[in-house]
Image (cartoon, rainbow, N blue to C red):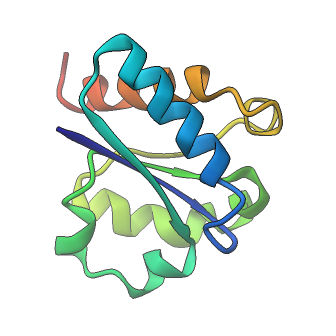
Amino acid sequence: MLHVRLFCGAGMSTSLLAKKMQDYANEKGVEVLVDARSVADIRNAAIEQLRELDCALLGPQVAFERHLHEPKFQEAGVPFDVIPMQWYGMVRGDLVMQKALDMIAEAKGE
């Protein structure tokens, strides 16, 4: 099972997007767990904890912190990017999930 985690300011505003992503994955028969956490969890997480993720996406409202967290995800070997603002605002779980799946496939060399 894949594990995709979304990070935002408090981990609450991405909850609806995480649900829409989960619903899309379920419709497509993709076994994935999507959850949302606070960006503070990145700061507190050990590299070993981040390695449990298959993909991590940062909410656009905290995109300015990307440069702070990217090195940690690179060290963990976890694909990491920012969710496009328009997709986030429109709660396009389908597009964000497909982005996550593409990132995972690319990281695996598929």
Q: Quadrant of residue 102?
A: top left
Q: Determine if residue 50 is in view.
A: yes
Residue at 58% x, 65% y: name it.
Answer: 67
For residue 91, side relative to residue 50 (left or right): right
For residue 14, side relative to residue 57 (left or right): right
For residue 66, side relative to residue 101 (left or right): right
Q: Determine if residue 82 is in view.
A: no
Residue 55 image offset from top left, x and y in percent:
36, 45
Q: Quadrant of residue 105?
A: top left
Of the 4 image quadrants, the one containing the N terminus is top left
Q: Nearer the viewer, residue 67 or 44?
A: 44
Residue 107 image offset from top left, x and y in percent:
25, 33
**As drawn, 94 above or below 2:** above
Q: Nearer the viewer, residue 71 or 83?
A: 83
Q: Quadrant of residue 51?
A: bottom left
Residue at 23% x, 53% y: name it.
Answer: 77
For residue 69, side relative to residue 31 (left or right): right
Residue at 28% x, 22% y: name it.
Answer: 30
